[in-house]
Image (spheres, helix red, strand yellow):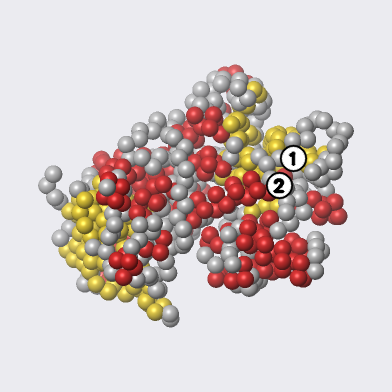
Amino acid sequence: MNGSSGISNPPSRTLISAVNLSKLYPVSEGWFRRDRSFIHAVDGVSFDLARGETLGLVGESGCGKTTTGRMLVRLTEPTDGQVLFNNESGDLEDIAHLKGAPLKNFRRRAQMVFQDPYESMNPRRTIFDTVAEPLHVQKIGDHSERFERVSETLSMVGLTPPSSFLFRFPHELSGGQRQRAAIARALVMNPSFVVADEPTSMLDISIRTGIMQLMGELADQLGISYLYITHDLAVARYMCSRIAVMYLGKIVEMGETEEVLRNPVHPYTKALLSAVPVPDPGADREPVTIKGSVSVPVDPLPRCRFYDRCPIADDFCRDNDHPPLEDKGAGRLAACHKA
Amino acid sequence: MTSDPVLVVEDLTMHYATRAGPVRAVDGVSFSVERGQSLGLVGESGCGKSSIAMTLLKLLPDNARLVSGSITLNGVDVVPLSENQMREHRWDRISMVFQAAMNSLDPVYRVGDQIIEALEAHSASAPRDAMERVRELFDLVSLDPSYIRRYPHEYSGGMRQRAIIAMALACEPDIIVADEPTTALDVIVQDHILREMQAIQRALNMSMIYISHDMAVIAEVCDVVGVMYAGKLVEFGPTAEVYARPIHPYTKALMSAFPSVRGEKHDLATLPGEPPDLLDPPSGCAFHPRCAYATDECRTSIPPTAKHGDQWATCWNPVADVDSE
């Protein structure tokens, strides 16, 4: 596999690390105004993703999970922080600000699957053209080799026989088949890292399980690491060994999925969990204790992001900065002064 | 319990005319809703659940054709009514909360004025009384009265959905049809709105038809549930019983494919294949190409509707019985 390297920290098992990653978007308040405000879409996010591991990034809309995912594959350039990628030669490379040839080279290793299979494909191109596009861009193989590789990838994602899908257009495929084709496009380069942004949320339940199982099998077979972005904790439970819960641009809790779901530490995670309906008519859920709704983090005050909605916040939380993500025992990380 | 049905639907069939032939969107559906009861219609996209909602309100596109059946609302069959006559029932007796809350409010009018407009179209109340009623409605759905004079873009997604619900409640209908009212919302907001809708429904003893693809949401808000597949109701019964002991293989498959955050982590079942094309549904039972229990009978003849306790299902090989053998 990868050659030995002198770098021991972080360990070579780590494929990609986000280090204090931030993305600020300026809010324009008119021309020639210098004192602008910023939306803190992602604010100092750090985590490691091991080889072959699936980390779930969960949270409500607007919490910054998609922006984080896009920064890890460099579709969005971070404002601050590093994205350390363990490349083939075993060296750590900061890909946060790559450009030109090195960026193109990084794209061979890292790909993204988008939420909506109806929007993420050009309706006027065949499935072959769509899936072969990355090979074309990277100038890999001649036509027959690409044909071979695309067919192989289509059968891998369950579009069999490939010959009956290669020259069809997206509208001739069902939603589930389209999402399989989108996964094939991401995998055709044989990447080691894939960001999957809500890949099943547009699909019907009977189709969804098939795609979830496919993604799990491919991870096992090909040793792919996923950053799995979802708003659905139940889906995360089945896809991810670890999850990170985001709120207004910050990771508020991170740990083993089953552990976090069984025994959440952060009050936001608790609220999120108790809000999820259960498919059991007899089940009684605890009422959700938080009020209000998610705001937009424009120039947030230097205090806990969750302060306004938190049921257990006190004066200490009001007067102190946002708490760091720290170990609360048994490998669980949480960012809360009170927990 | 004495039966006091607000809505009785019998043998409802609705087709969409397309160039390729009729799409059988709703195919011989019968059910009834008691006063104060909430009925859930669950199924996947394209199974006809939204088409039923549009048919009940007779808000159908031009190419839709009501082939047969009756919709009896408080003892009146609304199927033969003209559009003008139907307008007297809509909002007053039956109203609807649509799927896309974002698009059901007019962006250039204040939200309060839109509700007043609906009120004035249906009752001869004075403007001052109408304003009073809007205040009551905002209070009912937990919206700040200061938002009455604001525009829809100033509302968050959850607040817009609350405003839509307030509008649906404006004329005190007997029954509300809610089509995926919380699907576009985050879970915490969904939780608030579901709880409020249940509280309002109980307080006003109103009936409700709740349409969703989400088995968990239906489990929480509905007394009875109907499972739809390919334009047909395939199983119907009290929610607790249907969830505890599904009879139709499709219901069972849906349950075992649904992930839950609580309880034991069971393996998720995968349903082979895709939902059928309603232009050309499969012969016999429409579910047979995907059904693990399918026999020759299922492929050739349409299954009968059979009662199993309080539940009923249309299946040749009901799973509850198969499993007990």
* Dot 2 alpha-carbon crowd within 10 angstroms: few under 14, some 14 to 19, many 20 or more: many
Residue farthest to the bottom, as pictured: B19
| Residue A17, placed above or below residue A328 | below
- Given residues A276 and B301, the one toward you in this image is B301
What residue is pinned by disc 2? A193
* Dot 1 alpha-carbon crowd within 10 angstroms: few under 14, some 14 to 19, many 20 or more: many
Q: Earlier in the sequence, mark 1 or mark 2?
A: 1
Task: Find numbered disc 1 in the image and state the secondary structure of the residue it sits on.
Answer: strand
Q: Position of residue B38 (x, y in %)?
A: 27, 48
Q: Which mark is residue B299?
A: none
Q: Which mark is residue A15?
A: 1
Task: Find numbered disc 2 in the image and state the secondary structure of the residue it sits on.
Answer: strand
CB-based contact (under 8 Å), mark 1 and mark 2 = yes
Q: Position of residue A287 (x, y in %)?
A: 40, 32
Q: Is residue B23 left or right of residue A120?
A: left
Query: Which residue is found at the position 54% from the left and 23% from the top?
Result: A313
The subunit letter for the residue under badge 1 reads A
Q: Kindly identify the amino acid type of the residue bearing the numbered disc 2.
A: Phe
Using the rendered view, name the quadrant where residue B13 is placed.
Answer: bottom left
- Given residues A339 and B207, the one toward you in this image is A339
Q: Position of residue A296 (x, y in %)?
A: 60, 41
- Given residues A6 and A293, the one toward you in this image is A6
Total number of numbered discs in the rendering: 2
Query: Which residue is found at the position 35% from the left and 61% from the top?
Result: B294
| Residues behind callouts 1 and 2 on a single chain | yes
| Residue A10, placed above or below residue A187 | above
Residue farthest to the left, as pictured: B2
Q: Position of residue B222 (x, y in %)?
A: 30, 46
Which of the image's four quarters has the N terminus of chain B?
A: top left
Q: Is residue A192 left or right of residue B238?
A: right
Query: Which residue is found at the position 87% from the left and 33% from the top?
Result: A6
| Residue B286, placed above or below residue A329 | below
